[in-house]
Amino acid sequence: MASLKIPATIPLPEEDSEQLYKAFKEWGTNEGMIISILAHRNAAQRSFIRAVYAANYNKDLLKELDRELSGDFERAVMLWTLDPTERDAYLANESTKMFTKNIWVLVEIACTRPSLEFFKAKQAYHARYKTSLEEDVAYHTSGDVQKLLVPLVSTFRYDGNADEVNVKLARSEAKTLHKKITEKAYTDEDLIRILTTRSKAQINATLNHFKDKFGSSINKFLKEDSNDDYVQLLKTAIKCLTYPEKYFEKVLRRAINKMGTDEWALTRVVTTRAEVDMERIKEEYLRRNSVPLDRAIAQDTSGDYKDMLLALLGHDHA
Amino acid sequence: MASLKIPATIPLPEEDSEQLYKAFKEWGTNEGMIISILAHRNAAQRSFIRAVYAANYNKDLLKELDRELSGDFERAVMLWTLDPTERDAYLANESTKMFTKNIWVLVEIACTRPSLEFFKAKQAYHARYKTSLEEDVAYHTSGDVQKLLVPLVSTFRYDGNADEVNVKLARSEAKTLHKKITEKAYTDEDLIRILTTRSKAQINATLNHFKDKFGSSINKFLKEDSNDDYVQLLKTAIKCLTYPEKYFEKVLRRAINKMGTDEWALTRVVTTRAEVDMERIKEEYLRRNSVPLDRAIAQDTSGDYKDMLLALLGHDHA
């Protein structure tokens, strides 16, 4: 359930390109025009516009945006305009470089994308950075974090579905997880193996058995140790694998409720989810905060940046 | 340099299918006909024949082969007829099931295939077994072997080339490898990280620096501990990553020189390499054994099985 709104009649990419070209040419740049076009086109349409722009004006649209825009607005437009797999590659690479702050982004990308999409992001990573995501993550981490993060970004998970769940296995692995967690053996190889290699459907069944048998969710069991960075990471991975919309709601809540908005996280979540599950995230946000997400964002942001985010959230007129 | 020989004029897949259909119908099956067709068609052509056979006779060619043939000959024809990625998925799955004996096969597949081909084999694995290779390998291993094998089968390596090698990194990682190996810290996380995540080009540069700086190859350093199963595995991975044709020569040498041929290994290597680098492997075999590979195989095998292998090795007439 994407929040993105696309007009009933889409202009030709040639027309969109021409409008963008004119918007850059105007004295001071016509930001409204940029939003009204790019924030209302899906990934395939944006990619088409980029190709036509390059062919007709012999210029890279992304470089034009980079030159003409600035600040949070620039980041939002740039991230949005990128192809989703290129964008994931970009965000993941950025995270490996500024490691401690952004390790969550790697978990988020590895655990919330469907397997094939995540693989395509890894291909985009090869093409752009001439290294693999795996080697960059492994190189920049160590110890417990490495033990969990490297398999998370490496495994090509089976997508699976509810029909293919192995119930017996779910029961036995739920017991294994409970045993390890009550022993506080959070870096145990079986615990990491289960969470990093099983399909999401299988993990979901395992964690449902866990809850049925042991009375609380696995993350409740982990809660008391939640000051530990590694345990936080483990909880994040579990949440991303099982309830991505709740995970994203929390990231948004923290980004907005902070003293000083965390635009970095806000931009990332809005641009990466607008075409995927933003409507579900908005539902979760409203339920948890009793305020609609668009209103919360409108109160915390301003100018073109605000207009861009609201357009991606589904406002018709930026 | 494939050894496979394809006739200058290829019959239509309809004609091949008809000949195969007739070969199955004959009293006692016409094995010669099966070899003369399938062992002289490349992967795309075989795949086409399978599709046409299914369309025209409403039967799965692989099932027909399974019913009509038997023993080593059957395994050779079956493995050969499979699409290379399906074949790798099949061999890898077989290995996870009969683990201790066949762990080498997993290392071989993970380390000798180009990254994208190995990925496609993992996709074929999902489709056929409704699990991931990663979860099956992780589930069936433990301890040191798991530490090395799981990242080997998980990483989507950057292919890389000599121009993209980071020389400074190669120097520093050569030192790291030397330090860990002289300390006999064979399961050290940095050592495993380097071998399981770096591109083959980068690993090659690192091991060249290793040899230049420390006077012997890394596998020479590992030799004294080569009775250890884990160290054997490590040496196998290094050999597969850097000199696949030497690795395959050794597998063939051992398969043939044994008391009682190891048909299981012989069939695997011939069917998986005939379309890839068998000419290079034949060169290595001749250099190392002073006997041509085809002669050695002819002396050790017989009947249709022998004819099939020799056809794949490049003999015109089976």
Image (tube, coloured by chain):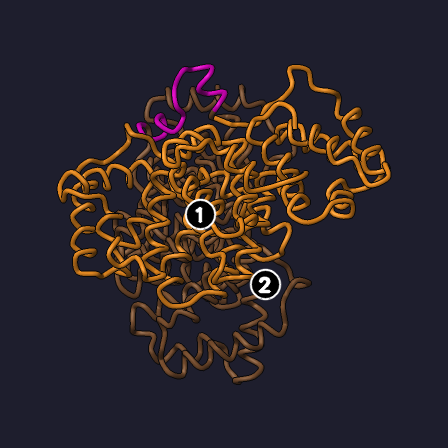
Chain colours: A orange, B brown
Quarter of the figure with residue B171: bottom right
Q: Answer with left or right where residue B18 lies relative to residue B6.
A: left
Residue B59: image tag: none
Q: Chain of mark 2?
A: B
Which quadrant would the C terminus of chain A be assigned to in this image? top right
**Viewer-nearest of labels 2 and 1?**
1
Q: Secondary structure at mark 1?
A: helix
- In the picture shown, does residue B305 fall above or below B197? above
| CB within 8 Å, label 2 to label 1 | no
Residue name at image x 51 percent, y 36 percent: A273
| Image position, residue B109 (x, y; %) | 43, 52
* Viewer-side residue, B317 vs B108: B108
- In the picture shown, does residue A133 fall above or below B178? above
Q: Secondary structure at mark 2?
A: helix
Residue name at image x 35 percent, y 80 percent: B184
Q: CA distance from mark 2 to mark 1?
A: 43 Å
Residue range corresponding to the magenta coloring: B51-67
Return the residue at label 1: A254
* Viewer-side residue, A223 vs A49: A223
Q: Amino acid at mark 1?
A: Arg
| Image position, residue A155 (x, y; %) | 41, 49
Classify mark 2: residues with Cα within 10 Å, few (<14), some (14-19) or many (20+): many
The reply to whether the magenta stretch includes residue B57 is yes
Return the residue at label 2: B201
